[in-house]
Amino acid sequence: MPDKIKSRVDTLISNMSLRAKIGQLNQPETPTENNIEEFKEAVRRGEVGSILMSVGATAGNDAQGEINVDFYNELQKIAVEESPDGIPILFGRDVIHGHRTVFPIPLAMAASFNPELVCRCYRDTAIEATNDGVHWTFTPMLDLCHDPRWGRIIEGTGEDPYVGAGIAKAVVEGLQGDNLSNKDSMLACAKHFIGYGASEGGRDYHRTEISDYSLFNYYLPAFRAAIKAGALTVMSSFNDVSGQPVTSSRKYLTDILRGNLGFEGFVVSDYDAVIQLIKQGVAETPEQCAAMALNAGLDMDMHDKCYIDNLETAVKKGVISESVIDEAVRRVLTVKIRAGLFEHPYTEKKTIDRSKHLADAREMAAESIVLLKNNGVLPIDKNSKVGLIGPFANERRSLLGSWTIDGKAEETSTLSEKMREEIGGNLNVINSAALAWDSTNKNIAAADVVVLALGESWTATGESRAVSDITISAEQKALIKKAKTYGKKTVGVLFCGRPIAIEEIAEDLDAVVYAWHTGSEAAGAVSDILFGVKTPCGRLPVTLPRKATHIPLYYNVTSSGRPVNCYYGENPGNCYVDSMPTPYYPFGYGLTYTTFDYSKPVCNNSKLSLQEVKNGKKFDISVFVTNKGENSGKETVQLYIHDACAGMMRPLRELKGFKKAEISAGKTVKIDFELSYDELGFYDEKGNYIVEKGKFEVFVGKDCLTNNSLEIEII
Ligand code: BGC
């Protein structure tokens, strides 16, 4: 931290009363009409360090009003001009995947395998949200997850730590921009630290069991990347890890977060998490909760007022030392200064031209959508007669997804509107008295292709929205069956938040487009793909299982000792005797409108000494990829490694590189990768990074099942 900031913080703290210091650690939510005057008094007394700009415990699924910039400016004026120390309030809001312009849900953006575009979308987001006075957003959500029953899987980046780390960096850089103190830079918050995505059975807020070895290798890499990219705030998670609530865990919030990951910013609790230590059974009184959380390294208390109501007496009674409070306040003030809040505490709302943001949203939606199956039916010829049917044909709100506080359903086009723009009278939207179809239905009889618009509601995902059955409704499944009886080519467009159990659905369709909840421009992007205006290029950042009973199913597993030579559910001996839990669609999978051929990968320096690798030498790996089809297309070339023999068991495949390349029909391009010290090691259970001598298999191909490989060795 530069000396100038440090001395500014020291001066501020030396003049502050204990009450005012604790005020900086207090984050109430936006007042309502009932408590507004009382709230203003608290601001006047310096008791409000930050405001959560929403109301309610599950803001992502509750309607929130639009941001009233004048109102927040009025509160800010009280803080700056009337509170004892004149410290501005930090305004925080859940701006999770876009603001007024809504980008695809984060899991879908991960499917783009395009971090540069992710970064651009979050830059657009920051421009819009800061114009509404939001200084700080609770994004990126980096909870690695192996269980699609968990409703919050949509907010993360899927099952892979390498993808998670790449997206974490892109989001932080996009939100925070070139200079954090710019007016249009928004503070990022890496959440939820740590292990929330591992909740047992996918049940929200539930216990987790994570070994330190798994923690360092699966759950922490994305947080490490966010911190390296400049994230100055982290949100602690609700869950416990192996019996320790994270909220009160010095091991996680200080030793690992600050000690091992080098985090220097401040930690905010999750909503009401501090007081919940009582329910979690590790504290008896609110005062104990506050003292335990603060001592663990949790600096700011979201919503429950546990700090503001208890820390003063805790200090007076000697339960906690004032120096611990000073340390937390120092961190909060440092971030406020670095964010330029003292220089520009107020918001001057301008009119923003969102056309570029909407164009980025359209591009991102198109890059996120994954074509899973195509028996020659897509793209649809614009001269064909198309029947469109299903509950999502005229849907708006669900296309935006959960955790969309500021997007507007009424500004979101439906699929039928966008398809009509493309093919006019050739589209017949068949009303969802659909199930009453009969063979005399002229619209169906006349159609060359039937598009079924299916999916799950935005309310089926998000916080507190776990489900036991990861599939679409029985009515929609019946619709697929019915469509098949007409003998027409049928295309299923699946607007889903989470990965769903796909076997039963995919079998009866000629083509399957996994459209996720892809935001403001979802419908336009789907239409572009259906009619070949755009070539699909998204890839799965999560495994799509055959059925829910196969959960957990993820690609980066270790090998069991017996039977041998099996991977990813292919073990007849140790899997289920009644069904084989192989992925229906594996991690990294996705089709385009062309086909790509791969050469064998080559490495001209396939043996390097450990010392050379430590000194920065890299293995140079390349592959030639040829577009064999008649359409141009984007291929995501993926590189996986397997450390053949190591001090700890290593996954059979670990993604360690990907390149997305546009390749014209008939053309061949050379794709280069480098494998360095940073990709070839792993963490031991103490968090030490280790690179060992030995052989590695390197796989280069179109998804995690590729066997196109070579061997390299660290000698
Ligand atoms: C969620 C957080 C969110 C916070 C504020 C909590 O319930 O877990 O992700 O940022 O609420 O809305």
Image (cartoon, rainbow, N blue to C red):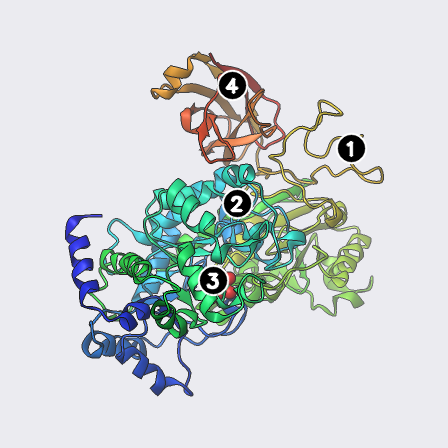
* Residue on which the image places disc 2: 111
Q: Label 2, secondary structure: give it.
A: helix
* Sequence-first disc among 2 and 1: 2
* Residue on which the image places disc 3: 270
674 vs 507, nearest the viewer: 674
Identify the residue at horizontal 62%, vertical 46% (top origin). Answer: 146
Amino acid type at mark 4 = Pro
Q: Is residue 470 above or below residue 669?
A: below
Q: Is residue 413 visible?
A: no
- Front tag of 2 and 1: 1
Mark 3 surroundings: few (<14), some (14-19) or many (≥20) residues within 10 A: many
Please state if 70 lies on the left or on the right of 602 as rendered.
left
Q: Is residue 206 visible?
A: yes
* Sequence-first disc among 2 and 4: 2
CA distance separating discs 1 and 3 = 40 Å
Amino acid type at mark 3 = Asp
Residue 198 rendering spot, x and y as whole percentages? 59, 49
Mark 1 surroundings: few (<14), some (14-19) or many (≥20) residues within 10 A: few
18 vs 645, nearest the viewer: 18
CA distance separating discs 2 and 1 = 31 Å
Count of number-bearing discs: 4
Q: Is mark 3 within 8 Å of ligand 1?
A: yes
Image quadrant of residue 396?
bottom right
Mark 4 surroundings: few (<14), some (14-19) or many (≥20) residues within 10 A: many
Residue 292 rendering spot, x and y as whole percentages? 45, 60
